[in-house]
Protein backbone atom coordinates (compact mmCIF):
# COMPACT_ATOMS: atom_id res chain seq x y z
CA UNK A 1 0.00 0.00 0.00
CA UNK A 2 1.26 3.48 -0.83
CA UNK A 3 0.27 7.13 -0.77
CA UNK A 4 1.98 9.06 -3.54
CA UNK A 5 2.32 12.76 -4.24
CA UNK A 6 2.84 14.02 -7.75
CA UNK A 7 3.84 17.61 -8.54
CA UNK A 8 2.14 18.84 -5.37
CA UNK A 9 2.27 22.52 -4.49
CA UNK A 10 0.82 24.50 -1.62
CA UNK A 11 0.51 28.21 -1.17
CA UNK A 12 -1.57 30.36 1.13
CA UNK A 13 -3.46 33.44 0.03
CA UNK A 14 -3.13 36.49 2.26
CA UNK A 15 -4.70 39.91 2.06
CA UNK A 16 -2.34 42.84 2.30
CA UNK A 17 -2.84 46.55 2.77
CA UNK A 18 -5.50 48.08 0.60
CA UNK A 19 -7.06 44.66 -0.02
CA UNK A 20 -4.22 43.45 -2.22
CA UNK A 21 -3.95 39.68 -2.46
CA UNK A 22 -0.65 37.87 -2.38
CA UNK A 23 0.31 34.22 -2.52
CA UNK A 24 2.75 32.83 0.01
CA UNK A 25 4.44 29.68 -1.34
CA UNK A 26 5.06 26.87 1.13
CA UNK A 27 5.77 23.72 -0.91
CA UNK A 28 6.66 23.50 -4.59
CA UNK A 29 6.51 20.59 -7.09
CA UNK A 30 6.72 17.81 -4.48
CA UNK A 31 7.06 14.19 -5.63
CA UNK A 32 7.01 11.92 -2.61
CA UNK A 33 5.60 8.61 -1.39
CA UNK A 34 4.75 6.98 1.91
CA UNK A 35 4.87 3.17 1.79
CA UNK A 36 3.52 0.46 4.02
CA UNK A 37 5.95 -1.01 6.50
CA UNK A 38 8.19 2.03 6.85
CA UNK A 39 8.66 4.89 9.27
CA UNK A 40 9.36 8.16 7.50
CA UNK A 41 10.69 11.01 9.62
CA UNK A 42 10.17 14.61 8.50
CA UNK A 43 12.42 17.35 9.86
CA UNK A 44 12.96 21.04 9.16
CA UNK A 45 12.91 24.48 10.68
CA UNK A 46 9.78 25.86 12.29
CA UNK A 47 7.38 27.18 9.66
CA UNK A 48 9.05 25.35 6.77
CA UNK A 49 5.94 23.35 5.83
CA UNK A 50 6.38 20.04 7.69
CA UNK A 51 2.90 20.00 9.20
CA UNK A 52 1.44 21.35 5.96
CA UNK A 53 2.94 18.38 4.10
CA UNK A 54 1.54 15.90 6.61
CA UNK A 55 -1.89 17.51 6.69
CA UNK A 56 -2.14 17.36 2.90
CA UNK A 57 -1.15 13.68 2.77
CA UNK A 58 -3.63 12.61 5.45
CA UNK A 59 -6.57 14.38 3.84
CA UNK A 60 -6.84 17.37 6.16
CA UNK A 61 -5.63 20.11 3.81
CA UNK A 62 -6.08 20.15 0.02
CA UNK A 63 -3.04 21.06 -2.08
CA UNK A 64 -3.09 24.11 -4.31
CA UNK A 65 -2.17 21.87 -7.25
CA UNK A 66 -0.94 18.36 -7.99
CA UNK A 67 -2.37 15.01 -6.88
CA UNK A 68 -2.23 12.83 -3.80
CA UNK A 69 -3.18 9.25 -4.61
CA UNK A 70 -4.14 6.46 -2.22
CA UNK A 71 -5.18 3.01 -3.41
CA UNK A 72 -5.29 4.21 -7.01
CA UNK A 73 -7.49 7.25 -6.45
CA UNK A 74 -6.82 10.91 -5.79
CA UNK A 75 -8.06 11.47 -2.25
CA UNK A 76 -9.17 15.03 -2.96
CA UNK A 77 -11.49 13.79 -5.69
CA UNK A 78 -13.55 12.24 -2.90
CA UNK A 79 -16.55 14.05 -1.49
CA UNK A 80 -16.41 15.38 2.06
CA UNK A 81 -18.22 12.37 3.57
CA UNK A 82 -16.06 9.81 1.78
CA UNK A 83 -12.88 11.68 2.65
CA UNK A 84 -13.92 11.80 6.30
CA UNK A 85 -14.56 8.04 6.26
CA UNK A 86 -11.16 7.44 4.67
CA UNK A 87 -9.38 9.48 7.34
CA UNK A 88 -11.27 7.73 10.12
CA UNK A 89 -11.01 4.14 8.89
CA UNK A 90 -7.65 3.99 7.14
CA UNK A 91 -5.56 6.80 8.67
CA UNK A 92 -4.54 7.27 12.30
CA UNK A 93 -3.78 10.93 12.99
CA UNK A 94 -1.92 12.30 16.01
CA UNK A 95 -2.22 16.11 15.84
CA UNK A 96 0.54 18.37 17.09
CA UNK A 97 -1.75 19.77 19.75
CA UNK A 98 -3.36 17.15 21.98
CA UNK A 99 -7.13 17.48 21.77
CA UNK A 100 -10.02 15.47 23.20
CA UNK A 101 -13.73 15.77 23.92
CA UNK A 102 -13.82 17.22 27.41
CA UNK A 103 -17.15 15.68 28.39
CA UNK A 104 -15.98 12.14 27.63
CA UNK A 105 -13.73 9.88 29.68
CA UNK A 106 -10.32 8.79 28.46
CA UNK A 107 -11.73 5.40 27.48
CA UNK A 108 -14.59 6.91 25.51
CA UNK A 109 -12.29 9.38 23.75
CA UNK A 110 -10.11 6.51 22.57
CA UNK A 111 -13.17 4.60 21.35
CA UNK A 112 -14.70 7.46 19.34
CA UNK A 113 -13.09 6.73 15.93
CA UNK A 114 -14.12 3.07 16.17
CA UNK A 115 -17.72 3.95 16.95
CA UNK A 116 -17.84 6.32 13.96
CA UNK A 117 -16.33 3.66 11.69
CA UNK A 118 -18.33 0.59 12.61
CA UNK A 119 -21.53 -0.63 14.25
CA UNK A 120 -19.83 -3.95 15.10
CA UNK A 121 -18.36 -3.49 18.57
CA UNK A 122 -17.28 -7.03 19.47
CA UNK A 123 -13.56 -6.13 19.16
CA UNK A 124 -13.80 -2.72 20.79
CA UNK A 125 -13.28 -3.75 24.42
CA UNK A 126 -10.19 -5.84 23.65
CA UNK A 127 -8.61 -3.21 21.41
CA UNK A 128 -9.20 -0.46 23.97
CA UNK A 129 -7.78 -2.47 26.86
CA UNK A 130 -4.66 -3.41 24.89
CA UNK A 131 -3.90 0.20 24.01
CA UNK A 132 -4.56 1.44 27.55
CA UNK A 133 -2.22 -1.20 28.93
CA UNK A 134 0.53 -0.75 26.35
CA UNK A 135 0.64 3.01 26.84
CA UNK A 136 0.47 2.77 30.64
CA UNK A 137 -2.79 4.69 30.94
CA UNK A 138 -5.11 1.90 32.16
CA UNK A 139 -5.51 3.69 35.48
CA UNK A 140 -6.81 6.77 33.65
CA UNK A 141 -9.63 5.04 31.74
CA UNK A 142 -12.37 6.74 33.77
CA UNK A 143 -10.59 10.10 34.05
CA UNK A 144 -11.46 13.18 31.98
CA UNK A 145 -9.13 15.21 29.75
CA UNK A 146 -8.90 18.17 32.12
CA UNK A 147 -7.52 15.84 34.80
CA UNK A 148 -4.56 14.69 32.71
CA UNK A 149 -0.99 15.90 32.36
CA UNK A 150 0.38 16.85 28.95
CA UNK A 151 2.18 13.52 28.61
CA UNK A 152 -0.89 11.53 29.60
CA UNK A 153 -3.03 13.44 27.11
CA UNK A 154 -0.46 12.80 24.40
CA UNK A 155 -0.67 9.04 25.01
CA UNK A 156 -4.47 9.18 24.90
CA UNK A 157 -4.27 10.82 21.46
CA UNK A 158 -1.87 8.13 20.26
CA UNK A 159 -4.16 5.36 21.53
CA UNK A 160 -7.13 7.02 19.80
CA UNK A 161 -5.22 7.15 16.50
CA UNK A 162 -4.59 3.39 16.66
CA UNK A 163 -8.02 2.12 17.71
CA UNK A 164 -9.14 1.41 14.11
CA UNK A 165 -5.88 -0.41 13.28
CA UNK A 166 -5.14 2.03 10.44
CA UNK A 167 -3.09 1.36 7.33
CA UNK A 168 -1.19 4.64 7.78
CA UNK A 169 -0.30 6.61 10.90
CA UNK A 170 0.48 10.34 10.81
CA UNK A 171 2.07 11.68 14.00
CA UNK A 172 2.96 15.35 14.42
CA UNK A 173 5.52 15.71 17.25
CA UNK A 174 4.28 12.52 19.02
CA UNK A 175 6.99 12.72 21.71
CA UNK A 176 5.96 16.20 22.89
CA UNK A 177 5.41 16.32 26.67
CA UNK A 178 6.76 12.78 27.16
CA UNK A 179 9.55 11.77 29.53
CA UNK A 180 12.32 9.47 28.28
CA UNK A 181 10.60 6.20 29.25
CA UNK A 182 7.27 7.10 27.66
CA UNK A 183 9.00 8.53 24.60
CA UNK A 184 10.72 5.18 24.05
CA UNK A 185 7.43 3.38 24.70
CA UNK A 186 5.59 5.42 22.05
CA UNK A 187 8.34 5.17 19.45
CA UNK A 188 8.67 1.42 20.03
CA UNK A 189 4.93 1.07 19.48
CA UNK A 190 5.12 3.00 16.19
CA UNK A 191 8.10 0.86 15.14
CA UNK A 192 6.09 -2.27 15.97
CA UNK A 193 3.20 -1.04 13.84
CA UNK A 194 5.54 -0.36 10.92
CA UNK A 195 7.04 -3.83 11.24
CA UNK A 196 3.49 -5.20 11.02
CA UNK A 197 3.04 -3.42 7.68
CA UNK A 198 1.64 -0.02 8.63
CA UNK A 199 3.03 3.09 6.95
CA UNK A 200 4.13 5.70 9.51
CA UNK A 201 5.00 9.37 9.02
CA UNK A 202 6.45 11.26 11.98
CA UNK A 203 7.03 15.01 11.95
CA UNK A 204 9.54 15.65 14.72
CA UNK A 205 12.49 17.77 15.77
CA UNK A 206 13.39 15.05 18.32
CA UNK A 207 16.64 13.39 17.23
CA UNK A 208 15.63 10.17 19.04
CA UNK A 209 13.02 9.54 16.35
CA UNK A 210 15.85 8.97 13.87
CA UNK A 211 16.81 5.78 15.71
CA UNK A 212 13.42 4.27 14.84
CA UNK A 213 12.95 5.64 11.32
CA UNK A 214 13.76 3.95 8.02
CA UNK A 215 14.16 7.21 6.11
CA UNK A 216 14.51 10.88 7.02
CA UNK A 217 13.47 13.81 4.84
CA UNK A 218 14.15 17.50 5.34
CA UNK A 219 11.68 20.19 4.30
CA UNK A 220 13.44 23.42 3.30
CA UNK A 221 12.91 26.14 0.70
CA UNK A 222 9.68 24.52 -0.44
CA UNK A 223 11.34 21.19 -1.21
CA UNK A 224 11.33 17.74 0.43
CA UNK A 225 14.76 16.12 0.26
CA UNK A 226 15.87 12.74 1.56
CA UNK A 227 18.91 12.89 3.85
Image: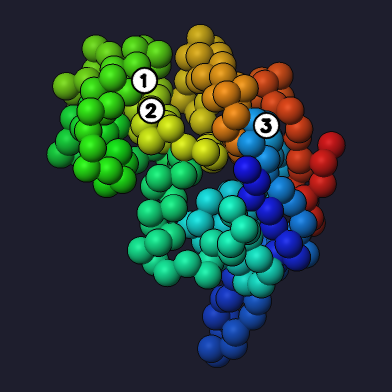
Q: Quadrant of residue 113?
A: top left
Task: Check the image and report above or below for 171 versus 4.
Answer: above
Give the number of the disc on residue 131: 1
SS under mark 2: helix
Residue 128 shows in this picture: no
SS under mark 1: helix
At 60% across and 29% down in the image, what residue appears?
197
Which of the image's four quarters has the N terminus?
Answer: top right
Few, some or many C-alpha atoms within 10 Å of disc 3 (few <14, some 14-19, many ≥20)? many
- Is there CB contact under 8 Å for labels 2 and 1? yes
Give the spatial CA distance, label 1 vs label 3: 21 Å
- Tell whether 64 sits left or right of 83: right
SS under mark 3: loop
In primary-sequence order, the first of circles 1 and 3 is: 3
In primary-sequence order, the first of circles 2 and 1 is: 1
Give the spatial CA distance, label 3 vs label 2: 19 Å
At 39% across and 57% down in the image, what residue appears?
84
Relative depth, front residue between 3 and 13: 3
3 or 2: mark nearer the eye: 3
Give the spatial CA distance, label 2 vs label 1: 6 Å
Task: Check the image and report above or below for 44 versus 212.
Answer: below
The residue positioned farthest toward the top in the image shown: 181
Q: Quadrant of residue 68?
A: bottom right
Relative depth, front residue between 39 and 127: 127
Q: Which residue is mark 2?
A: 159
At 53% across and 88% down in the image, what residue appears?
19
Amino acid sequence: MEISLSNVEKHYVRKGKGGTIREIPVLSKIDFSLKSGKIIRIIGESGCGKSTLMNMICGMLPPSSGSIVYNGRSIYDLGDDDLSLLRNRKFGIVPQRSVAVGSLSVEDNIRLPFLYASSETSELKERTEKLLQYLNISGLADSFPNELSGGEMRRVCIARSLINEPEFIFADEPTNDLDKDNMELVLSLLRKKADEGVGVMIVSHDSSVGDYADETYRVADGQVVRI
